[in-house]
Amino acid sequence: MKGHRHLTIVIKLGSSSIIDEKTHEPLLSILTIIVETAVKLHQDGHRVIIVSSGAIAVGLRRMDVEKKPKHLPRIQALAAVGQCRLISLWDSLFGHLRQPVAQVLLTRNDIADRTQYQNAQNTFNELLNMGVIPIVNENDTLGVTEIKFGDNDTLSAITAAMVQADYLFLMTDVDCLYTKNPRKFPDAQPIEVVKDIASLEADVSSAGSSLGTGGMSTKIVAARLATSAGVTTIISRSSKPGNIASIVQYTQAIRNASREAVPQAFTPPEDDALTTSISSLHVDDSIRPPLHTRFLPDLHPIRDRQFWLLHGLAAHGTMYIDQGAHRALVAKAGLLPAGIIDVEGAFGQQEAVRLVVVASKSSISSAGTNGSTTPTKSTLDSSVPVEVGRALVNYSATEITRIKGLRSTEIESVLGYADSEYVALRENVSLFKRDKSSSPAES
């Protein structure tokens, strides 16, 4: 791949990908190929980050514990034991090829503060500039539900966005996504390219291993996060990590052929991006890759601060706003108290909240606030409540409850002070993308 532009590649490995599910022994044959692949990519000029699970599984083996316990302090203690062994194993394997590595342990709290998020970005960039391969894991020793990413699929997507990666590889126990479960249905068809995750119809019945926390559904969520940040996301078989280089080479060949086939002055429509017939692009058959699923990146990615607001912060509550307030936010105006219908939860100043558009207070009971709904023009124009984004608020839940629906000039007379005329400044609001049937990006 020499001669091609240098890429940033994030490789996510689950516990079951590198640790035997029954014996809890490291799968040295797989680990060795991963190391060789990462070093080869690095030697070709690419920047590589590995997001590696496995601390708890290695801790189980070290302490001769058969099954993962349910008691949280015991799990955290096993993670502390296992993380030492895990990073030592990675360091030893990379050391044979004279490749330096670094350990980076994160929780959501570590990136909840904007300055800490930027510090993490700077650390990653400096390590990569030094030629180091960072080994990232969630800090399970400190992690509790409130500050956990939930699974390393999500962590890998946030890491990929943080470093503005070109590729995120989510390694799993199947070659790719299928229309049905291939173990049960012989007629299951592979899904090789996904342009629109919202319309994806695939089998997600894989629930993850006894060692891990993620399944296929968490990988689709991670792909949604990563592609929204402009990262091409790949699902590929973890038992064949050597396929990574072939897939990168093939995908870059498609991109290069696409650029050569399209005049520079012409910008293709979104639906045609990177989906031109391969045969028409004259891609060499000799570099056709192993089976995999490729999620195409958003042509209008959410970057840096806007991505951090949407995905780096945990929401502490919900703010219900009317359609007029939402239209103002789309038009890049701030959020005024007049457009707020109600609040839910106990949150303080400068904490993140969900923004949900409702037609009236009576429709709040049916509001969906799990972040899974994709805003569309039809839902936003109807009485169906829909989450549209996140905001850092200037007032607490108690204060907003008192000033909701009022003019900004009335804030001081109600509260006795007015820190800001806005409940949330526009720079502290980030909106989810609407689907392709509606208007362009609204970050």
Image (cartoon, helix red, strand yellow):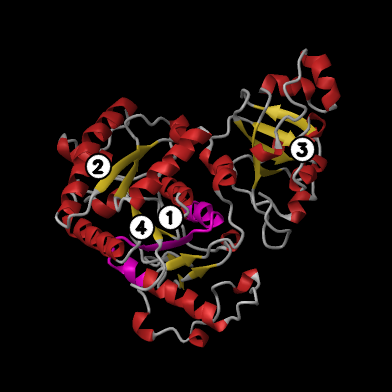
Q: Amino acid at mark 4?
A: Arg
x, y percentage for residue 29? Answer: 17, 59
Q: Quadrant of residue 235?
A: bottom left
Type of amino acid under label 3:
Ser
Disc 4 to disc 1, C-alpha distance: 26 Å
- Residue 228 painted magenta: yes
Chain-order first, disc 3 or disc 2? 2
Tell which circle, 3 or 1, labels the residue nearer the N-terminal end: 1
User: Looking at the picture, which amino acid does disc 2 mark?
Assistant: Ala
Residue at label 2?
57
The residue under label 3 is 363
Image quarter in which the N terminus is found: bottom left
Residue type, mark 1 in image: Met
- Give the residue number, with chain letter if any, for mark 4: 47
Q: Tell me the CA gap for discs 4 and 2.
A: 28 Å
Reading the chain from its start, which is encountered first: label 3 or label 4? 4
Residue tagged 1 = 216
**Is 443 on the left or on the right of 274, as rendered?**
right
Q: Which residues are magenta?
A: 220-247
Does residue 84 sit above or below 420 in this rendering? below
Q: CA distance from mark 3 to mark 1?
A: 33 Å
Which is nearer the N-term, disc 4 or disc 1? 4
